[in-house]
Image (cartoon, grey):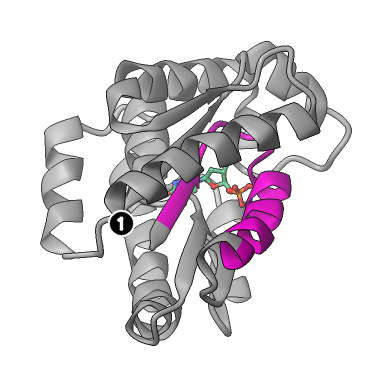
Amino acid sequence: MFITIEGIDGSGKSTQAKRLAQWLEDFTGHETICTFEPGGWDGGKSLRDFILGSSGYCAQSELLLFLADRSEHVSRVILPALKAGHNVICERWNDSTLAYQSGGHELNVSDAERIIAACNFPEPNIKILLDIEPETAFSRIASRTPDKFEAEGLKLMKKVSEFYRSRAGEYAVIDCNNLNEEEVFAALTSKLEVYICQSR
Ligand code: TYD
């Protein structure tokens, strides 16, 4: 299975992805790898640092940089793992590119979708959206050194959140508002359990 986790910065993706990987491995009996974008491949850190540190690029350049990162990630990590029969959990995917570069930075959505489609990346079996109020997420990340996107503040987060929510039908949405880490995890695994049993 290929599962992606989406959400605005501070929505708790990393914490849940790691827990979910262990759960999925136990539940399915298949080795499960947990990876992330940008930069989740051997040598990807320098591209990640470049993308998240550089400023002044137009939204289309941002999109192309994220797609270059994804291309390496797909060919070096994701496809080999799926071909070996492993499960893959990936923090962020094409949906982040649409939400941030189109929703946030106003790149034309259908242009972005066409460019992404031309890359022929694998389709996730299930896409999870950790939905949380931007104000709550923003307060969680306030104490850390912001990357290029976080530095744009609440205004960008609200636009990105709105974009994700406008496509909520594409996701298994977990409403994380007023839930603690344990409760989010319980909601997540009960949704996945239903999905996996139905698809067997
Ligand atoms: P991420 O690693 O999830 O941030 P964190 O440090 O909180 O774990 O993602 C880094 C940033 O990159 C995040 O602000 C979202 C942005 N991003 C895009 O704008 N487009 C993309 O396609 C991806 C994958 C990430």
Establish if 91 lies above or below 141: below
Depth order, front residue of 123/30: 30
Residue drawn at (56%, 72%) of the image: 33
Residue 75, how many percent across, how many down?
A: 34, 81
Quarter occupied by residue 73: bottom left
Residue 151 part of the magenta-drawn span? no
Image side of residue 186 versus residue 107, left or right: right
Quarter occupied by residue 71: bottom left
Residue drawn at (28%, 46%) of the image: 60
Count of number-bearing discs? 1
* Tag 1: amino acid: Arg
Q: Quadrant of the C terminus?
A: bottom left
Span shown in magenta: 3-26
Residue 90, how many percent across, how many down?
A: 50, 58
Q: Residues within 10 Å of mark 1 (few under 14, many from 20)?
A: few
Depth order, front residue of 67/181: 181
Residue drawn at (38%, 48%) of the image: 197
Establish if 85 lies above or below 180: below
Q: Which residue is mark 1?
A: 200
Establish if 31 lies above or below 54: below
Residue 112, how many percent across, how many down?
A: 20, 43
Image side of residue 132 versus residue 164, left or right: right
- For label 1, the SS is loop
Residue 20 part of the magenta-drawn span? yes
Depth order, front residue of 79/136: 79
- Taking the image as drawn, is residue 179 in sight? yes
Depth order, front residue of 61/4: 4
